[in-house]
Image: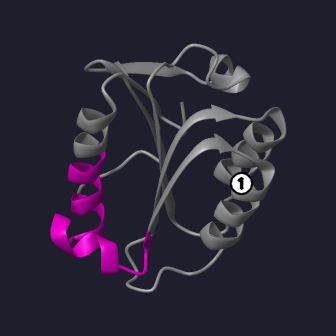
């Protein structure tokens, strides 16, 4: 059985990052890429500013039980994130309330989240992952 990280930060080319995320998500959910849009455990949030309202929506959805039993998966694509939303997302990732996976997609990784330095980081290709989860 494959083991997946709790969270991922994918940076650089947005389309390439989405493709890489979708490959991993298909493995997690055991679903074909073309079927993800109808999968009840998959959520794609694309917004120019990830707000506290968005973070609360993700938290609410992450706390729900997986419909298909393989976990809930979230892609968050956002150019900016508020400090409040960053803190709320961190809390959600620390205590998701269920099996959840988070994929944060951004053009740049600089100043993504202040708490990034508190994790033990492992370099994986040109993306950073932590054994805990999000970057």
Q: Residue 31 location, x and y as percent?
A: 20, 72
Which quadrant, please, contains the C terminus? top right
Position of 24 with respect to 94 (left or right) is left
Residue 90 position within the rendered picture, expressed as x and y whole percent measured from the top left:
71, 42
Residue drawn at (32%, 73%) of the image: 37
Q: The N terminus is located in which quarter?
A: bottom left
Furthest residue toward bottom = 67
Q: Which residue is the site of mark 1? A: 55
> What residue is rendered at 32% in x and 80% in y?
38
The residue range painted magenta reads 21-42
Q: Position of residue 41 (x, y in %)?
A: 43, 75
Q: Is residue 24 magenta?
A: yes
Residue at image position (81%, 33%) is 83
Residue at x 18%, y 64% (from the top left corner): 33
Rendered view: 96 above or below 119: below
| 85 lies above or below 61 | above
Pick whichever, 13 or 103, lies toward us: 13
- Secondary structure category for the residue under label 1: helix
Q: How many marks?
A: 1
Q: Which of the 4 quarters of the picture holds residue 98?
A: bottom right
Image spot of residue 78 (x, y percent): 55, 39
């Amino acid at each position: 059985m494959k083991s997946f990280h709790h969270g991922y930060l994918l940076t650089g080319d947005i389309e390439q990052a989405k493709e890489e995320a979708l490959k991993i998500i298909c493995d997690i959910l055991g679903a074909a890429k073309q079927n993800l849009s109808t999968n009840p455990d998959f959520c794609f949030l694309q917004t120019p500013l990830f707000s506290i309202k968005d973070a609360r929506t993700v938290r609410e959805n992450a706390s729900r039980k997986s419909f298909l039993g393989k976990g809930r998966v979230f892609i968050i694509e956002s150019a900016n994130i508020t400090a409040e939303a960053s803190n709320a997302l961190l809390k959600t990732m620390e205590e998701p309330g269920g099996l959840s996976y988070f994929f944060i997609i951004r053009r740049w990784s600089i100043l993504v989240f202040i708490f990034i330095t508190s994790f033990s980081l492992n370099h994986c290709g040109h993306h950073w992952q932590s054994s805990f989860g999000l970057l």
